Image (cartoon, rainbow, N blue to C red):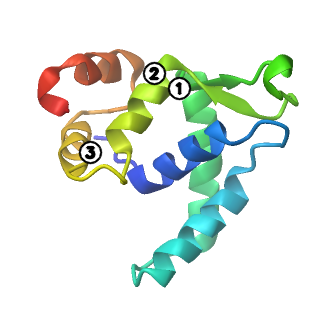
Amino acid sequence: MTTYNWDLIERLLHEVQNSAGHSFTPRPYAEQHAAQKAAEGEPIGNLDHLKAVADEYEKLLLQRGYIEPRPQEEGGTGTNYVLTQRGSSLLSLLDSSIPGNDHPRQVLDEQADALDESTFDKVASEAKIA
């Protein structure tokens, strides 16, 4: 069973949304994420490991169709992305600003690999997750 750091993935997806005109850089985003968690009193663990995980998440999100290169006419630089429909669905399920977002994360955690394309598409389409 594959487990994911949903808070970090949420952070990365938000950064994708805001990456027009500048490069998407997962390692600094992971560092900022860790600093925010530490300020909230949460343990952050090994920062170098978290940065490496952020790099792997970037590759995974791109390979599995959650993000794609940003078109030049939308501020694309060749090193930044936009959310795909699947990525937008994932972000809406993970959005920590929405009260009660724990249930969708729990449902995702119950999957063998929640970010597998067919698994995610099936789970995201079910009414019970929202």
Graded by Cα atoms within 10 Å as few (under 14), some (14 to 19) or many (20 or more), the crowding at tag 1 reads: many
Question: Please, what is the three-letter code of the amino acid marked with disc 1?
Answer: Tyr
Vertical comparison of 27 with 83: above or below: below
Label placed on residue 66? 1
Label placed on residue 86? 2
Q: Which residue is mark 3?
A: 105
Question: Please, what is the three-letter code of the amino acid marked with disc 2?
Answer: Arg
Q: Quadrant of residue 121?
A: top left
On the image, the x and y values in percent for residue 102 come to 22, 51
Q: Are marks 2 and 3 in contact (CB under 8 Å)?
A: no
Instruction: Residue at 18% x, 32% y: name it.
Output: 129
Instruction: Tell me which numbered mark, 1 or 2, is placed earlier along the sequence.
Output: 1
Q: Are marks 3 and 1 in contact (CB under 8 Å)?
A: no
Instruction: Tell me which numbered mark, 2 or 3, is placed earlier along the sequence.
Output: 2
On the image, the x and y values in percent for residue 130 come to 20, 33
Q: Nearer the viewer, residue 97 or 32?
A: 97
Instruction: Residue at 82% x, 34% y: name it.
Output: 79
Instruction: Residue at 79% x, 18% y: name it.
Output: 71
Q: Are marks 1 and 2 in contact (CB under 8 Å)?
A: yes
Question: Please, what is the three-letter code of the amino acid marked with disc 3?
Answer: Arg
On the image, the x and y values in percent for residue 117 come to 41, 19
Residue 46 visible in image: no
In the displayed orientation, state which residue is furthest to the left: 128
Vertical comparison of 25 with 119: above or below: below
Please tell me whether mark 1 sits on a helix, a strand or a loop: loop
Q: CA distance from mark 2 to mark 3?
A: 16 Å
Q: Nearer the viewer, residue 50 or 72?
A: 72
**Does 63 sit left or right of 23 as displayed?**
left
On the image, the x and y values in percent for residue 53 come to 57, 53
